[in-house]
Image (cartoon, helix red, strand yellow):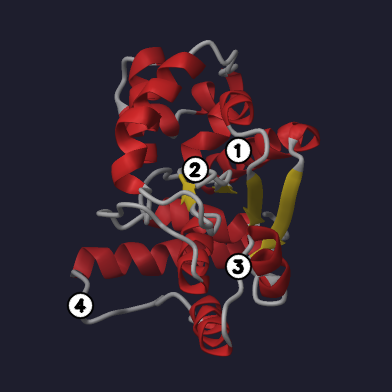
Amino acid sequence: MSERPPIIVLGANHAGTRLVVDVLRTLGSAAGRIDNEWLEDRTFLEVHRRLISHIAGKGWTRTIFDMGFVQGFHDDAHLVPDIRGWLAEGLPDSFPDRSRPWHWKCPTAVMFLPSWLEIYPDALFVHIERQPVDVARSLVRRRQFLDFGRATAFYEAMNRRVLDARPAMTNYLHVSIESLADNLPSLAEMAGLSPDHTSLGKACASIRRQPRRGWQSDRSLLGNLWETTTNLRAAVRERNGRR
C-alpha cells in the first residue's frame, strides 16, 4: 500500500487547531495515538519535544511561549535526518495504515515549517485562524500569558510564520473558526474523505458548540474569579478597539 502524505493542521496555540483535529477525526481521518487534552498524536508531540530539547535549555512550556524564541528562531532544517529517524520509530504504532487519510497537529510545528516542508512537501496544510482577542483571552485564561498585549503579539507572530511559508505549500486550505462549518465540504474533498451525512452533522455540531464561559459550579472560586476577570479585560479591549 502506498503511503499518503498527512494532513497537517497549522495555527497558533488556542487558535482552533484542536477543533480542526476533532472535525477531521469525525469526518473519518486517522488521528493517531492521542492521550492528552490537546488531541495531539503521541509521536508528533514527542518529535517536537525532542526538537525543543535540542535547541533550548529552558524546558518545553517556557520555550514555546517565549517571545524571543517565537520571534527570533530560524529553522534551517538541519535536524531533518533526526526527525525522520524519530518518525520511523513512532509512526508504525501511531499510524499503522497510512494509505488512508491521516492527520496530526502540534502548534509548535509552526516553528519548524522548513523541516516539515522538506519531509512532507505534498502534505495538505490546513491553516486555522481566529479573532486575536479570542486567542489572547484563551491564552490569558490558561495563564500562558498574563498580559493581553503579549498574548496577541504571540498569536500574530505564530500566524505570520505560517503565512510566510505559505508560498512553499503545494496543498493549502485556509479556514477560520467562523468559516469552518462552511468549509467542511472543501476540507473533506481536499483531505480525500467521503463522510456521510451523519458524520457531517456531528462535525458541524462540534464546531457550533460554544465553549463554556462565566461562573461554573465545577470550577474553584479562584478559577471562577480568574475567568471572570479575564473575560472583563477582553471585553474592555474589544470596546476600546484593541485586538
Residue 107: image tag = 2
Mark 3, secondary structure of its residue: loop
Viewer-closest of 241 and 186: 186
Q: Residue at x 74, y 38 (%)?
A: 169
Look at mark 4 in the image and give the residue it sits on: 218
Residue 2 in the image: x percent, y percent?
54, 44
Q: Quadrant of residue 37?
A: bottom left
Q: Earlier in the sequence, mark 4 or mark 2?
A: 2
x 60%, y 67%: residue: 193
In the image, 113 versus 56, the foreground residue is: 113
Q: Is residue 217 above or below residue 93?
A: below
Q: Answer yes or no: do the residues labelled 1 and 3 have beta carbons within 8 Å?
A: no
Q: CA distance from mark 4 to mark 3?
A: 38 Å
Question: SS of the residue at dot 4?
Answer: loop
- Point out the frontmost of discs 4 and 1: 1
In this rendering, which labeled residue sits more in front, label 4 or label 3?
3
- Distance CA(mark 3)–CA(mark 2): 23 Å
Classify 10 Å Cα crowding around label 1: few (below 14), some (14-19), many (20 and above): many
Find the distance from the CA under tag 2 to the CA under tag 1: 9 Å
Mark 3 is on which residue type?
Answer: Leu
Residue topped by disc 1: 158
Q: Which residue is mark 3?
A: 193
The answer to whether marks 2 and 1 mark residues whose Cβ atoms lie closer than 8 Å is yes
